[in-house]
Image (cartoon, grey):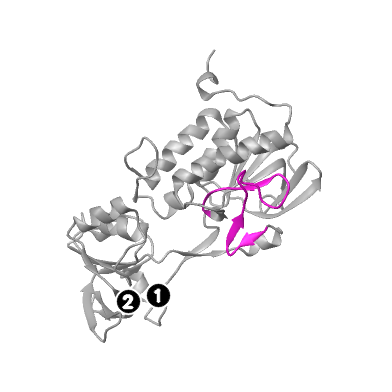
Amino acid sequence: MTDKIYDIAIIGGGPAGIFAAYYARLRKLDVALIETLPNLGGQPNTLYSQKKIYDIAAIPSITGSELTEQLIEQINFIGCDKFLGTSVSNINQVDDDKWELTTDNDNNKTIIAKSIIIALGNGAFEPRKLTFDYDHELETNNIRYFVNDIEDFRNQDIAIAGGGDSAVDWAVDLNKVSNRTFLIHRRNKYRAMENSVDHLNSSSVEQLNPYIIKDVKPNVDKMDIIMKKLKSDDIDTITVDKLLVNYGFVSDSKILKEWNIDLEGPFIKVNEHMETNLPNVFAIGDIVTYSSKLQLIATAFAEGPIAVTKAIRNIYPERDFFEHSTSLFEN
């Protein structure tokens, strides 16, 4: 057990968690930032390091790795205790005003905090894969679920499967380096931001709608994608070097159920203060759901301060003032 008692323990070191930690430190709270991976950044840094992000205020566009670098610079400027490569296996209320977090580090060392913010992103996630049987040797060179290096797609014929923001954005970005780009989607309309669809429509990406992928087969060092057009008997085949499958993620919410947190599907239910059903346990980011919830980084950045502010009111009710950030670092 650590001797220190933290005001807030934040579980998750993605953008939402890092910014919540920064804001909590602005409010003069002692913060423990806990991340399972050895580095901060979460999915934008791990899975979308080179993908452009467009919904950050005052920043026209930024990659996942660039965003992570700036968030880390921001939290390092003010400082907080970081527990990297550390998973939280259990949370337990030890008395009316403290929580004990059991970790898998250093013989199940525990962290004590007066409040908790869960910022797990999509939780323990894995990509949704193709739903039919195929030769999994294709995943060695031809089928991808993430883009680790955009140069892997340079001067190649590629296909992207999916119709959400990520699929549309990757189609536009990869088309800038590829020889030929196809976007395969089962509907005629995309589940993506209007601006992204405008960029797609003005690009040379070849849109194959409404098609579903029925099979993939090796073709020397390339692969054939066999597609069926919906509401039709038409079968078409394209040959590409790589297929990027972008069907989203499957989230494992088992551990959250073990913590007795109320869920709605895989998501944590919160109120307007980001409070869960457990006292002084909050949740923010992609892991939460509430009326009018938007799955945007911009939304997650706003949810952190809401949770921190409510936590302060709960654990320090005598703090009835707010100091504006412009005055925090004045001599």
Give the amino acid type for the residue marked by disc 2 in the picture: Ile
Of callouts 2 and 1, the N-terminal one: 1
Q: Residues within 10 Å of mark 1 (few under 14, many from 20)?
A: some
Tell me, yes or no, if residue 194 can be seen here. Answer: yes
What is the x, y in percent for residue 331? 54, 12
What is the x, y in percent for residue 121? 52, 53
Residue found at x 59% / y 31%: 25
Q: Which one is in front in this view, the residue at disc 2 or the one at disc 1?
A: 2
Asked if residue 274 is among those painted magenta in the image, a careful observer would answer yes
Which quadrant of the structure image shows residue 144?
A: bottom left
Q: Nearer the viewer, residue 18 or 162?
A: 162
**Outermost residue, bottom side:** 233
Q: Which residue range is magenta in the image?
A: 262-286
What is the x, y in percent for residue 160? 30, 66
Residue found at x 56% / y 31%: 79
Identify the residue under disc 2. 212
In the picture, the disc for residue 188 is none
Q: Nearer the viewer, residue 138 or 24?
A: 24
Q: Nearer the viewer, residue 274 or 126?
A: 274
Which quadrant of the structure image shows residue 204?
A: bottom left
Residue found at x 62% / y 43%: 273
Residue found at x 61% / y 25%: 322
Tell me, yes or no, if residue 147 can be seen here. Answer: no
Compared across the picture, whether 88 is left or right of 96 comes to left
Q: Residues within 10 Å of mark 2 (few under 14, many from 20)?
A: some
What is the x, y in percent for residue 193? 34, 53
Identify the residue under disc 1. 130
**Outermost residue, top side:** 331
Quadrant in the picture for the N terminus: top right
Query: What is the secondary structure assignment of the residue under circle 2?
Result: strand
Compared across the picture, whether 73 is left or right of 23 comes to left
Give the amino acid type for the residue marked by disc 1 in the picture: Leu
